[in-house]
Amino acid sequence: MNPILQFGTSRFLQAHADLFISEALENGDALGPITIVQTTDSAQSARRVAAFNQPGGFPVRIRGRRNGVALDREQRVTSVTRALQASHDWPQIREEMCTSVKVIISNAGDTGYVLSDADHPGLLESDIAPAGFPAKLLVLLHARFKRNAAPVTLLPCELLVNNGTVLSELVVKLARDWSLSEEFVTYLKTDCIWVNSLVDRIVSEPLEPVGAVAEPYALWAIERQPNMLLPCRHPDMVVTDKLEPYERRKLFFLNLGHTFLAEQWQIAGGPAEMTVLDAMTDHSLSSQLVALWEEEVMPIFRALGEEDESRAYLEQVIDRFSNPFLVHRLSDIAQNHAEKKRRRFGPVLALAAGQGLAIPQNRLRAALARTAA
């Protein structure tokens, strides 16, 4: 039985958390292997589950430059040894949750924290999986509480500020909405360790049936919590008392940069296959992006006393955007574009105002105005 339970089979998790844990296992620095839970139900999902269950692992191809050295290598990820489908294997998932699981990892996507009207308290004693991810967690944690109330660490990887705190509050609210006991609510708050974390790696393409192509750069920044249990130790994992600076740099430079390029691509009606690399080699696009970073973003980090670290990170981002090996399409980045603009542009404007900075930030304001129009 595996000590790590992972919700989500995205190519990102395959090339990030799954790869980290696989590399750590080789050095004896991981808790153990992973059981993956596929939460969607389709023929493609079934094929993916079947592929994860094949012996020998799956490939992740690392392509790009790191520390000035060109890399193009394929690694086998062997940390995933079991894959289950929520719609078919819920009793087995519940049993693992009540026995072997010590750490839960998730990446439920942009809408993963949305509650489903289809979920109800009757599912607590059912072999039918809830529809929404928060309800799935609630049902599994309630079963664990009833069996042995063992502690568990939850490490969300969704691209949401304070993801652990937000998820915890959702699950506690749902427990109260379902009129569950205060003893259980106390268990959720004290014995379930909800950890805020930040993940950073560009994963540009899937490999079929499972696997991915990713850049060499990777970061898993984790906010220190008392009694938390990490799935592994890894050189690209950082445990910090202060996650916010890492979040700001990634959101304001990498994520904002991607979404700004997607915005310009949409406005211009650019080619469907246009990539980030294409945009960076187009002087009219890349110059707009660099001006945005320098004029509308960097003054904020200067005011916060974080300019040196931010410039070093920005140099890495520019190098990553110019990776000649990755096919990172702007059409992929543009998915859920309006919501991404709200999440990525709005906080930049709000923080500048909070710092009392008199900078126009016209590009960001114009992009948000196009969403509202």
Image: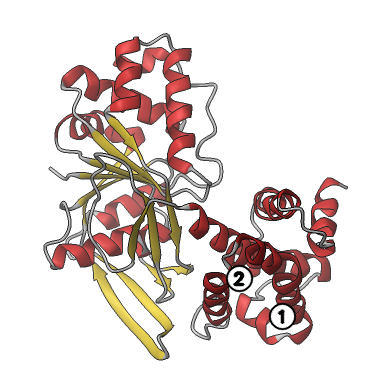
Q: Residue 254 placed where, x, y %?
A: 58, 67
- Of callouts 2 and 1, which one flags the residue occurring earlier in the amino acid sequence? 1
Q: Secondary structure at mark 2?
A: loop
Up/down of 82 relative to 258, above or below: above
Query: Residue drawn 34% across and 60% down?
Result: 238
Q: Quadrant of residue 189?
A: top left
Up/down of 115 relative to 229, above or below: above
Query: Residue drawn 51% across and 36% down?
Result: 113
Q: Secondary structure at mark 1?
A: helix
* Amino acid found under the numbered disc labelled 1: Ser
* Mark 2 nearby-residue class (10 Å; few <14, some 14–19, many ≥20): some
Q: Which mark is residue 329?
A: 2
Query: Residue drawn 62% across and 75% down?
Result: 276
Residue 373 showing in the rendered view: yes
* Amino acid found under the numbered disc labelled 2: Arg
* Mark 1 nearby-residue class (10 Å; few <14, some 14–19, many ≥20): some
Q: Which residue is mark 1?
A: 286
Q: Quadrant of residue 27?
A: bottom left
